[in-house]
Image (tube, coloured by chain):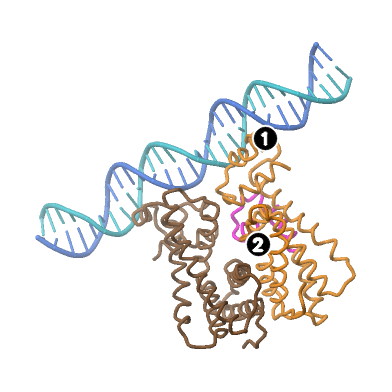
Chain colours: A orange, B brown, C blue, D cyan
Amino acid sequence: MEIMEGAALCFESRGYAATSLDEVAARISSTKGRIYHHYASKAELFLDVYRTGMMMNFQAIEPLLEHDMPPVERLKAVLGAHVRCVIRTKAFQNVVIQGVDMLRHGTMPANEHAELAQLAELRDAYSEHFSKLLEDARAAGAIDYSRIKIALNSLFMCINGPIVWFTPREGQAEHDIEAVADECVLYAMRLLGYSGEMP
Amino acid sequence: MEIMEGAALCFESRGYAATSLDEVAARISSTKGRIYHHYASKAELFLDVYRTGMMMNFQAIEPLLEHDMPPVERLKAVLGAHVRCVIRTKAFQNVVIQGVDMLRHGTMPANEHAELAQLAELRDAYSEHFSKLLEDARAAGAIDYSRIKIALNSLFMCINGPIVWFTPREGQAEHDIEAVADECVLYAMRLLGYSGEMP
DNA sequence: TTGACAACATACTCGATAGTATGTTCAACT
DNA sequence: AGTTGAACATACTATCGAGTATGTTGTCAA
């Protein structure tokens, strides 16, 4: 909904701590009263944006996990879907990133901390999907890596990169997204030792 | 100096906006008075940490740029030195990252904004070194990439990854750093289409 | 038509924190 | 011994923003 989108944009550009709820309200031409009518606190709004961002990711990739195809092809498809999704929901994904290292450093107020930890489990579950994809593709001999934790981290850094550095050219958004996503997937697959052809 | 190290650690864990100078002072068992004796404002302290972080990077790689060796080998060596450096100066590098997207989103107060932009140029100069390394290695036919901007961004995401996700095991710090750095360089080189052997 | 409630807006409170103003200590000159 | 100034510490102010308390408006049900 509207509040979350405004919040996502504010959190993205100024960070959780630096964002005031008056700012968020102003962005949607509204007032703080409206926000507090729907959310008990700033933290809860943040957590809702986080959760929504993760849901978008799940919805993007889960349909592909069932498809019956060679492991490498499935991996490629999922990576592509992931990158496209995170680019399109950039603001939300920035909040997810912030949430992850808020947990890591324990900056969240104690009461909401439990909820944050729960969302982190969601993130782990998501990561687990990729873990499985890697193992399958390796078992099929299509890719190779040394320690899976480091490989996974490097992979995520690569395919999540656009969240940080991507900005579409005027009027070229859709075209740019496709091109950037494809190139990111190419580099990601290479990183994993894949040597086959890419479309 | 002591103040910068405390500040780097605080900024790393809580972010610029959420960090109070009382916190920084407490971390070094001191008081806010001391900080304001050396820095005119919170922003200037931040900028000094940023600058110091960048300097550390330059010092780590610049000696290697002169070496007379095949372009790929030089690239490998520089990547290795960079990763080792950023891991060892993790707190400072987190500040650099924050600084980069504070500029991107224009959150810094107007007077210090100019100084921040100047530091961004330093960052660009650093990136330019890698740009040259890539072009040379490609000219030598050792690596390959499509659009250099995307390749560079993906490369940096990969080799800067440890800044975000690395945490050494108890008492294994040195050993872990070496192992992680080598593996990151491996993935980074592969990402660039390098197919040679890695030590 | 009225009363009740949801969906807001407005107007306040109160704690936290950036920045300042004013001590205090100590070491080096003279 | 006395003066000065750097390097802090302490005590205060002024602002900003999270949270709250209290309006206001429209809508639906009885």
Distance of label 2 from label 1 (alpha carbons): 33 Å
Q: Which residues are magenta?
A: A99-124
Is B105 on the left-hand or right-hand side of B38?
A: right
Task: Residue at 59%, 50% (x, y): give it.
Answer: A16
Task: Residue at 64%, 48% (x, y): give it.
Answer: A9
| Marking on residue B76 | none
**Quarter of the picture holding the C terminus of chain A:** bottom right
Chain under numbered label 1: A
Identify the secondary structure beneath mark 1: helix
Q: Which residue is mark 2?
A: A162
Q: Nearer the viewer, mark 2 or mark 1?
A: 2
Is B168 on the left-hand or right-hand side of A147?
A: left
Main secondary structure along the magenta-highlighted residues:
helix
Which numbered disc flags the more N-terminal residue, 2 or 1?
1
Q: Amino acid at mark 1?
A: Arg
Task: Residue at 44%, 75% (x, y): give it.
Answer: B59
Q: Amino acid at mark 2?
A: Pro
Is B17 on the left-hand or right-hand side of A117?
A: left
Q: Label 1: how many residues lie within 10 Å, few (<14), some (14-19) or many (20+)?
A: few
Residue A143 lies, with reference to residue A118, above or below; the image says below
Rendered location of residue B188, percent (x, y): 63, 76
Q: Quadrant of residue A146?
A: bottom right
Q: Who is closer to the viewer here, C4 or B112?
A: B112
